[in-house]
Image: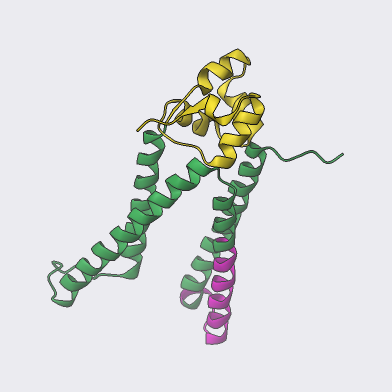
Chain colours: A yellow, B green
């Protein structure tokens, strides 16, 4: 699954640490999601979408 | 005003709790092991020592569970993978060594449960370290 968290984070002037703090996970988890090494759970995806005022499909793109 | 505990604060609290109960458990293990040899002679004290060992062990297990529950989803996944690898390694290697031990083919080495504990610890630490690097 591809995502645009890095771009959204930059647009909102947030560091990985800031974003991790806001959604209640570790910085390592944000980094792993950004790099596509880890797909977040639905609740975490909703939290990110809520934070960036974007629908989930605006952040994550499913790749076959 | 009570503020919401941040993820980092929660993790620090969990780590401290687990470290404390692990230290207490290690101390109770030492007491139950060496007490009958160096401190007392009455077997009632040994029963009490083992009782203390079991109680502190239960507290350590609870602290470990709490620690895992306080991890985020990626960290929990890393621990889960490490646990599954460790379980497999302990069963396969443990049984393999046990078979060799029954046939006296361990070159004089006397297989002890403590050895399996070492295998479990090393396997868990290695698996976790590999996962930490993998998701870095």
Q: Count of labels shown? A: 0
> Eyeballing the image, is A35 above or below A25?
above
At x 24%, y 69%, the residue is B95
Q: Residue at x 55, y 76 (%)?
A: B49
Side of B125 where B13 appears, left or right: right
B46, A22: nearer the viewer: A22
Position of residue B102 measured from the top left corner of the image (x, y, whole percent): 18, 77
The magenta span reads B37-60
| Image side of residue A19 versus residue B109, left or right | right
Q: State the residue in front, B1 or B108.
A: B1
Residue A52 percent across, percent down from the top left: 63, 24
Quadrant assignment for the C terminus of chain A: top left
- Residue at 58%, 80% (x, y): give it: B48
The spot of residue B47 in percent (x, y) is 54, 82
The answer to whether residue B130 is above or below residue B84 is above
Q: What secondary structure characterizes most of the magenta part?
A: helix
| Residue furthest bottom in the image | B43
Determine the residue located farthest toward the right in the rendered image: B1
For the question of whether residue A25 can be seen, the reply is no
Is-magenta flag for residue B64?
Answer: no
Along the line of sight, which residue is nearer the eye, B62 or A64? A64
Give the quarter of the figure containing the N terminus of chain A.
top left
């Amino acid at each position: 699954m591809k995502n645009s968290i890095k771009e959204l984070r930059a647009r909102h002037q947030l560091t990985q640490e800031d974003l991790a703090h806001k959604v209640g996970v570790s910085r390592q988890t944000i980094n792993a999601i950004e790099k596509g090494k880890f797909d977040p759970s639905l609740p975490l995806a909703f939290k990110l979408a809520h934070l960036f005022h974007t629908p989930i499909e605006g952040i994550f793109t499913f790749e076959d | 005003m009570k503020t919401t505990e941040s993820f980092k604060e929660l993790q620090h609290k969990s780590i401290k709790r687990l470290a404390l109960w692990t230290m207490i458990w290690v101390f109770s293990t030492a007491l139950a092991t060496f007490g009958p040899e160096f401190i007392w002679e009455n077997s009632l004290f040994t029963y009490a020592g083992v009782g203390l060992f079991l109680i502190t062990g239960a507290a350590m297990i609870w602290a470990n569970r709490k620690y895992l529950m306080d991890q985020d989803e990626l960290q929990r996944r890393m621990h889960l993978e490490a646990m599954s690898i460790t379980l497999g390694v302990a069963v396969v290697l443990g049984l393999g060594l046990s078979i060799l031990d029954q046939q006296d083919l361990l070159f004089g080495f006397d297989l002890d449960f403590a050895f399996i504990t070492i295998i479990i610890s090393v396997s868990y630490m290695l698996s976790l370290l590999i996962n930490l690097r993998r998701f870095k």
